[in-house]
Amino acid sequence: MYNKFKYIEGGICAAKGFKAAGVYCGIKKPANDDPSVKHKNDICLFVSDTECNTAAVYTQNKVKGAPLIVTKANLEKSGGKSVAVIVNSKNANTCNADGVEKAQTMCDLVSKELGIESEKVIVASTGVIGQILPIEPIEKAVPLLAASLSYDSHLEAATAIMTTDTVKKEYAVEFEAGGKLCRLGGMAKGSGMIHPNMATTLNFITTDCAVSAEMLQEALSEIVKVTYNCLSIDGDTSTNDMVSLMANGLAGNAEINANGEDFDTFKAALFEVMANLTRMLAKDGEGASKLLECVCSGAKDKDTAITVAKSVVCSTLFKAAMFGEDANWGRVLCAIGYADAEFDINLVDVELKSGNGSVEVCKNGAGIEFSEEKAAEVLKSDEIQIMINLNAGSESATAWGCDLTYDYVKINGDYRT
Amino acid sequence: MYNKFKYIEGGICAAKGFKAAGVYCGIKKPANDDPSVKHKNDICLFVSDTECNTAAVYTQNKVKGAPLIVTKANLEKSGGKSVAVIVNSKNANTCNADGVEKAQTMCDLVSKELGIESEKVIVASTGVIGQILPIEPIEKAVPLLAASLSYDSHLEAATAIMTTDTVKKEYAVEFEAGGKLCRLGGMAKGSGMIHPNMATTLNFITTDCAVSAEMLQEALSEIVKVTYNCLSIDGDTSTNDMVSLMANGLAGNAEINANGEDFDTFKAALFEVMANLTRMLAKDGEGASKLLECVCSGAKDKDTAITVAKSVVCSTLFKAAMFGEDANWGRVLCAIGYADAEFDINLVDVELKSGNGSVEVCKNGAGIEFSEEKAAEVLKSDEIQIMINLNAGSESATAWGCDLTYDYVKINGDYRT
């Protein structure tokens, strides 16, 4: 699937008709005062030239950030139509008595500034939970953001949504649908408090491909399951996670409103972008020194493959072993063993792979002789693949994670203060 | 419940008629060569003067250590009767092609040496997964162990089952049943690879109270649920975990074979011992600097209380915050929010407590003003209680865990090698 699409620059501005802006408004402390702040920008806005069909998925945490509550209500009111997105970082606006009111104000400010209906504004926040969101800096920032909007300011937006992220995450592709060239791109934010089984992290996807609201939601739900929901940094399901997908139709293709070749192509493009963003999120996990990519194949069904692959990248012990570059395959087998799925553990093979080569460590559920030197060489890489074959079918899935390091503990031992 | 029983010394030898022995046989490297080895002893044996009714619970991991397979089969063959227990540390005898054969050999060696049936021997192993267990040192050790058996060698046994444990874990109480003085005591081992939803860690309980096999199993299953199964160090469910409970009846009470006051007293004694061992296991979690005890009250039912309390002590982010002594209550609320249970998040109160005082941080699901100085003082303690009130009923439960530290990463980055 990775070779069918042409990578293009532009992130959320890659698709036709999307403008963006990102600025510093003062929610983050000035960078000099706070070493955890990697980028100064703390608020961004992006806007489509025309109204978009919109799909979204939200956290499954019972504690829902106020911005999610407002966004969900807005999209219900507008019948799934949106025009603009406003996002701040450093403060999650969650668990605050005035959270919904403030999130609503953010939409109203954008509405007034751009002359669009307030319910066509998506709002998101990311950062510390339970601190009152200062609204004055945002009031001052919105006119500035509107004035700064441009078709190539995707980078300003992508950096404005970063918290403990060390790199900005953007990806976009070109593809053809209905004989027209379409573009789909996105940006993501996330480093800690990331775990499967929800719309992990903040992710914003834009496309100029014309797709009906219904098919858009179907595509997003399907692809989220095998991308963001197969990502874990630390097992913590955040309160503010959201993925939005906006389609403005400016590519001029006939609207995709049913299953078929065009819809398959669209989903494949969405997978391409979301899988790449997921990989970036895993690699930039808080404190991470290694990307862990677990590929489970030979499963009797997709869910089994997903469950097993996730279980391995979620294992704290295995993550620590990878940090130590220790080929402790027993921990892989242990994590496979407590995965909540049905399979015969006595058929399971495990192989460790990287750019430095590969080494088989387990066959039919039992250890085999292998060269420790070879294994050490494989594990020196900063991108490790754990290949699991259940030898029980033909389905496969990938899960993404990272190693557990001293820096993870350091970052999270004093994030708030 | 903690005040109804008299604490007594003696661990697994506290109950009448139980002898123990622990020695070094050479499975562990000599202590000087391996700084991870805290205690030299690596094998122990304990024996009841008379046959015991026996209950046991095992790991729910699909990968089951060979010793568990053999023990389970033995107890089935013997109709739940046992006389002796042999345990080695440093090697889990799991995921080895010859594992079951070796575990069987361990039982046979004890059987021959003591002149008892092999199926009345319980065998357990703990340590690294997937390394061939050397049987020769064990063959040599069994006669030595048998010769060393004594009614007061509980300490030798308790230290022989330690792996990365830094302290031995023993607890015992006295109580009265059917007008007779009874004793119940146990020892436990465990530090990493510990997680709820199974019989976590190796735990051996002995009692001289006469209890029928059926009621023994009922008591064990009930109490495991609210003690060991409410413990998490790192979310990893081990392959070799087991709790056994042996009752030899030498206290001379009329056998407890039905519900009633005596059975309630017995279960309370079992809770007392297992809860204390659980607390010790949490406090000695790999790399831990703080014990975390989460008490969830005001739940509509027990399962809700358990689920919520566990979710908090399992949160990697919250564990790291506790290491940093950061009153990041948003992470507590976040973890409550993703607990798989039904309750109204808007009714939830949270308070942090320790020997240094207490501080309310969250009321009705939202943050409240609190003194950061006071919170810092509370969190300085090495035993922190997180008090959650769901304000929706009268059930409560406790879960135990520990903070996530640099040392956890260090220990698990190079455990195997």
Image (spheres, coloured by chain):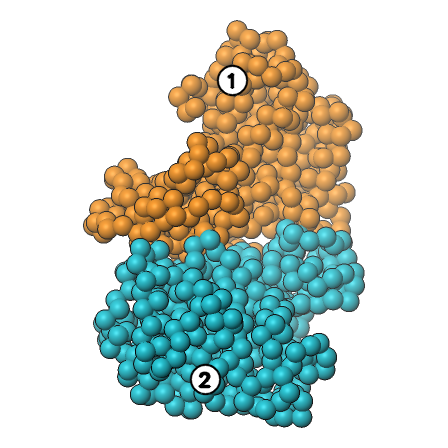
Chain colours: A orange, B cyan
Q: Residue B131 versus residue A270: which sits nearer the camera?
A: B131
- Chain letter belonging to callout 2: B
Q: Residue flagged by tag 2: what amino acid is it? A: Ser
Q: What kind of element bears circle 1? A: helix
Q: Are marks 1 and 2 on the same chain?
A: no
Quadrant (top left/top right/bottom left/bottom right) for the C terminus of chain B: bottom left
Q: In this view of the protein, can residue A192 be seen by the observer?
A: no
Q: Is residue A43 left or right of residue B286?
A: right
Q: Residue A285 versus residue B147: which sits nearer the camera?
A: B147
Q: Is residue A75 left or right of residue A155?
A: right
Q: How many marks?
A: 2
Residue A216: % across, % down: 63, 23
Mark 1 surroundings: few (<14), some (14-19) or many (≥20) residues within 10 A: some
Residue B9: % across, % down: 50, 90
Residue A177: % across, % down: 53, 12
What residue appears at the point 77 percent right and 67 percent down from the top-left corner? B394
What residue appears at the point 44 percent right and 19 percent down from the top-left corner? A5
Do tag 1 and tag 2 residues touch (Cβ < 8 Å)?
Answer: no
Q: Is residue B75 left or right of residue A325?
A: right
What residue appears at the point 30 percent right and 47 percent down from the top-left corner? A361
What residue appears at the point 65 percent right and 52 percent down from the top-left corner? B340
Q: Residue flagged by tag 1: what amino acid is it? A: Thr
Q: Which residue is mark 1?
A: A265
Q: CA distance from mark 1 to mark 2?
A: 70 Å
Q: What kind of element bears circle 2? A: strand
Q: Which residue is mark 2?
A: B48
- Chain letter belonging to callout 1: A
Q: From the viewer's perspective, is residue B214 above or below residue B194?
A: below
